[in-house]
Image (cartoon, rainbow, N blue to C red):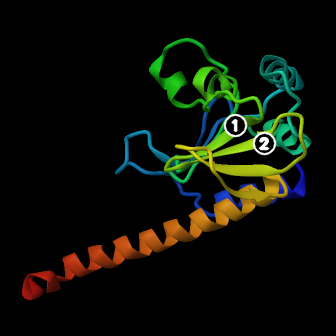
Amino acid sequence: MDIKLATILNQLNYWKSPDDVVLQDGTILICHLPEVAPLGYMHIIYPPLLMSDIEKIETLLKTKLPAQLVEFLLNFNGMDIFNSKLSIFGLKKYRDYSHFKQLFQPYDIIIENLGQNSTDKYIQFASYKESYNIFFKKNGDEKVYVLKKDNRELVCEYASVYEWLFQTIEILSQNFKESQTHRAKIKSFISSGLYKIMF
């Protein structure tokens, strides 16, 4: 595995817990969040694609994927990280409708770029849960573009998939750490009984 991809994996492994699971197909589930859902996990990392899968994506989308995105997909078939705050698309492997198999699959990069989502200029390969989609230019360079969901206004750009992903994980990690600290303080405050005196 490329050192840049290993660094990204290490960033996510910070959140490892005793309840982590590796599914039969190689999907990695990191940091169980039972308060969110019985099968909720902070990070879901999907197993690698084959080169034939990449060729299928490129054929159906009629564009070459950037080399760094190809390398990423050959190691991880997409990710849903930080409780799906960020989803990086991959290729759906299972087309049956069993709930469990459907649950642990990435958003499909082909489906996400068809119909009303398609553009002549960009291919979307990721999405922030809130307000932004992530693109690269068709048959363009390695740059990553962050656009608003509602009007596709350019918000910022990054030199590469790695630069974008590394910085995004750093920001989301910090937000989640602050959120956990805040929740712990509230829990401690309530359990201490002080809130009864103050309110």
- Relative horizontal placement of residue 162, taking residue 78 as reference (left or right): right
Residue nearest the viewer, comparing 81 with 27: 81
Give me the C-alpha separation between circle 2 and circle 1. 7 Å
Q: Tell me the SS state at disc 2.
A: strand
Query: Residue at the location (61% across, 20% down)?
Result: 115
In the rendered image, residue 172, in percent from the top left (x then y), is placed at 58, 63
Q: Residue sitting at 51 percent across and 47 percent down?
A: 129
Residue 46 x, y percent position in the rendering: 67, 36
**At 67% from the left edge and 20% from the top edge, which residue is drawn?**
93
**Element on which disc 1 rests:** strand
> Which residue type carries mark 1?
Gln
The residue that label 2 is drawn on is 136
Task: Please tell me in which quadrant of the rendered image residue 65 appears.
Answer: top right
Check the image and report above or below for 150 versus 98: below
Q: Nearer the viewer, residue 167 or 4?
A: 167
Left or right position of 185 against 172: left
Crowding around mark 1 (Cα neighbors within 10 Å: few <14, some 14 to 19, many 20+) is many
Give the farthest residue toward the top.
96
Which quarter of the figure has residue 118?
top right
- Numbered label attached to residue 124: 1
